[in-house]
Image: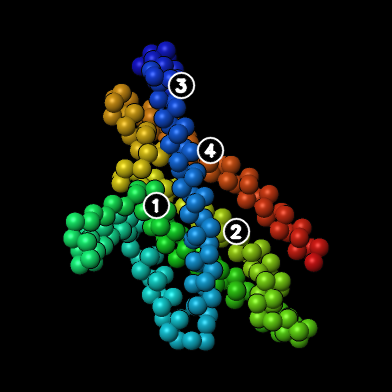
Amino acid sequence: MPAQSIWTLLSWGPDGWLDDIAYGALITVALALATLPIGLTIGFFIALAKQSEEPSLRLAANIYTTVFRGLPELVTLFLFFFGMPILLQHLIRYFRPDATIDVNSFVAGMIVLALIFSSYASEVFLSAFRAIPKGQYEGGYAIGLSNWLTMRKVIVPQLLRIAFPGLENCWLSLLKDTSLVSVVGLAETLRNASIAARVTKHAFLFFGVASLVFLGLAVVSSFATSAILRSLGRREAQR
């Protein structure tokens, strides 16, 4: 392929595909960032449930992580995107027979990725909880702190520092898993690269560009997480 045609295909404008790839990269980042706080929150509470003294909470949490870590991510996405509307349609039929249910691909991807991410993040949080000595809890109670204040002021700062390396790996997996949502029509990096490859017949070029986008996001994430980890270390040293 001539060099000029490569730059034409990768140009910004009607004759090129760079703007589509860039838009897909923005959607990838937006999907991952929208999923992250939901997954972290669910994962934290699942970890709390796993170490609860209530057997039913432990059982529910274990079932949750077993299901979403055991099912392939793509199967989970298909079950939610294609199966959930059918289930909701049957339920709503009793009240509004003519109603139709559509699931937005971005929302479906965000929910499914949050469920998967939280199941792995919960194990990271659980390991971090177990690494904190019980004397830390007892010390908080001894100075008059409530359970909530002990958790917020004593346990959580240590928990974040201990869990952070594992959560970084979960974040990188989340970035890569956003590509799965391309199969349900979300115009993220991989889908736009696939369209460009199909239209231009230059699959290696555009899938290579998509690979570089994901690698670039991983490198940026690595720098960002290293800075956050250093900040957490400084805060811990000041306590």
Q: Give the CA separation, mark 3 to mark 4.
A: 19 Å
Nearest to N terminus: mark 3 or mark 2: 3
Dots 1, 4 in contact, CB < 8 A = no
Q: Nearer the viewer, mark 1 or mark 4?
A: 1
Q: x, y (%) of residue 111?
A: 40, 57
Nearest to N terminus: mark 3 or mark 4: 3
Q: Give the CA separation, mark 2 to mark 1.
A: 28 Å
Residue at image coords 28%, 52%: 102
In the picture of the structure, the residue carrying the numbered disc 4 is: 216
**Seen in the image, is 228 located left or right of residue 144?**
left
Amino acid type shown at disc 4: Gly
Q: Nearer the viewer, mark 2 or mark 1?
A: 1
**Seen in the image, is 126 located left or right of residue 208?**
right
Amino acid type shown at disc 1: Val
> Can you say whether 171 is above or below 223 in the image?
below
Residue at image coords 35%, 66%: 70
Q: Give the CA separation, mark 1 to mark 3.
A: 29 Å
Please tell me how crowded label 1 is: few (under 14), some (14-19), or many (20+) other residues with Cα within 10 Å.
Answer: some
SS for dot 1 = helix
In the picture of the structure, the residue carrying the numbered disc 2 is: 165
Q: Give the CA separation, mark 2 to mark 4.
A: 19 Å
Please tell me how crowded label 3 is: few (under 14), some (14-19), or many (20+) other residues with Cα within 10 Å.
Answer: some
Q: Quadrant of the C terminus?
A: bottom right
How did the renderer colour the structure?
rainbow
Disc number placed over residue 12 in the picture, else none: 3
SS for dot 4 = helix
Amino acid type shown at disc 2: Pro
Nearest to N terminus: mark 2 or mark 4: 2
Q: Nearer the viewer, mark 1 or mark 3?
A: 1
Count of labels in the image: 4
Nearest to N terminus: mark 2 or mark 1: 1
Residue at image coords 18%, 60%: 97
